[in-house]
Amino acid sequence: MHAILQPYVVSRLPEPWCTMFRTTMLLLLHLGFSWVGFAEAHEGRDHDQAPAMILPVAPRVVAISPEFELVGVLSGAHRLTVFVTHFDTNEPVKNAKLSVSFAEQETEAVAKQDGVFELTAPWLAGTGPLDIVFKLTLPDNEDLLTGYLEKTVPIAPFPATTPNQQPVIIVGAVAFLSGILLALLITRILAWRQGRTSRGAHDATAVDGTTGLDRKVEQLRRAQIAILAVALVCSLTPSLETRAQGAINLPSVPATIATDAPQRMPDGSLFVPKATQHLLAVRTILTKESQAPRTVQLVGTVIPDPNSFGRVQSGHSGRIEAPQDGLAFVGKRVEKGDLLAYLQHHIEAYNKGNLQGEIAELEARISVQEKKLALFRKHPEVIPAVKIVEAEGELRALHQKRNELLPTLAEREEIRAPISGIISAGNIVAGQVVDAREVLFEIVDPGRFWVEAIAHDPRVASNLRIASAVLSGGQTLPLEFVGAGLALRQQAAPLSFRVTQVSQNLNIGRPVTVILQSTEEAVGIVLPASSVVRAQSGLPAVWIKTDAERFEPRTIRYEPLDGQNVVVLSGLAINMRVVTEAAGLLNQVR
């Protein structure tokens, strides 16, 4: 490199500046080679391979057949824990026997649980890859599976900086050093040009200048060597780091205490060990295409059947009194005509005084009329019979009027149940004063409920095939369409449905999701509703099992089917293993 740069600088510049120029050019050339090295170190990996583990995992063997899936984890120096599941459903095999063969040595595995076996053998302590044959025997089936037990698995290191940050830091350092050398070079060139204008001063100090010039040349050469050494170390950093990554072997800790925990890969996929899948009861289903009816989803509310709902109100103001059996309470089952409470009439003081004065006046008139009638009867020959009959009739009228006024001072009204059912609301206590038309009780027949849904397009019920209501817990109630209202509510038409199969935990006012299946059909993949989760982006997604312990998220577009299932219209293909149980737990792995 010195031989290449020397013809261009020596003939024009003094030795110190030639040295500085050569150092700067070498540093800039080194910058280009360093960038190429980083590109090779960070951009050359094979993207078809599965991403490296972030946390250490125990060595394992994987064997797959069309019907079964087997994963063996080295859980000790001579111990292998084997998990065997069905390929399609990921359900552990039951009533199975497992024998393991290696190098003509066959060992019977001990069954610990359904689909979990344990094997102890001395040949498991070998260092190289082990070619193992597994023989699975079931009551009605038999299968052979083969796999390699790898003892070394690379993991992703935890660098202080990310791969994208390391090239920027080192390139910045090299550029900073190059800038310093360029600044020194420009300063010396300007000083040299100014010195040429004064030949006399330069000749007078030639001897001493030569000595100082030699010292500066020596200092610059030393600086050149130091800077090149720093640049060489920076260039070797990515190469050494890459070699260190390849030299990491697993387990980095003994196999008996290896982490072997679920982890999310940088590409968003999950590594979930078979032991975790067995613990969480992860289940899958093999997708297949089918035809399903188109559906419409509405918001609904549970309401009582108008013919099985009763509301008890007070006819006038008064005070509540409890009957002998006590007041009726919420949740009590009553029959039609049962006594619920008493209502003692309340009379204002002014009205009460007038009523008492009227009663006293009636009693005085009754007393006078009785004496008059007794006198008439004492002398019948003197008093005509007509007079006696008139006196008797007037006395009876006075008694009847008094009898009608007396109860108003102390009369209480019986409050009875209008229908049979369960009291759903009770707003009274003993001694409470109520006003006229105040609601005292509400009685509901628990066997008869309706659902009212709001539809912005009333035509959704025109080609209705099946209707169902989904509760918050996932329970589905079959519905029967009753009719649609003509009066709009918030620019939507109310649709009424009768619940044909009532649930015990159904309450009035409970929100539900109404799903209407039309006669039109769509082609898609039917999955359980529990398969759909929310991705980090907020879009609906499902988890696809791509390998024995690898899961990948897949964004989908779907429609509800019947509350328990959904129809995936896009985002999936046939013969994919979709997680149907514990999908929400997998979505929480970080």
Image (tube, rainbow, N blue to C red):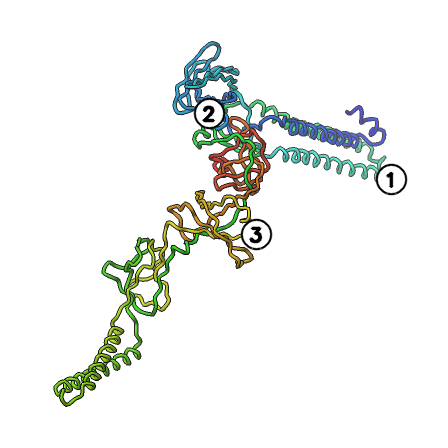
Amino acid at dot 3 = Asp
| Mark 2 or 1: the one toward you | 2
Q: In the rendered view, would you say 584 is above or below 459?
A: above
Q: In the rendered image, which residue does mark 2 sit on?
A: 85
**Residue 535 visible in the picture:** no
Amino acid at dot 1 = Thr
How far from the left and from the top, in percent, is residue 119?
42, 18
Tag 2 or tag 3, which sits nearer the N-term? 2
Q: In the rendered image, which residue does mark 1 sit on?
A: 197
Q: In the rendered image, which residue does mark 3 sit on?
A: 457
How far from the left and from the top, in percent, is residue 76?
43, 21
| Mark 3 or 1: the one toward you | 3
Amino acid at dot 2 = Thr
How far from the left and from the top, in percent, is residue 216?
75, 32
| Mark 3 or 2: the one toward you | 3
Q: CA distance from mark 2 to mark 1?
A: 92 Å
Q: In the rendered view, would you say 462 is above or below 438?
A: above
Q: Going by the picture, which residue comes out furthest to the left?
A: 378
On the rendered structure, is 354 left or right of 85? left
Q: CA distance from mark 3 to mark 1?
A: 95 Å
How far from the left and from the top, in percent, is residue 530?
48, 38
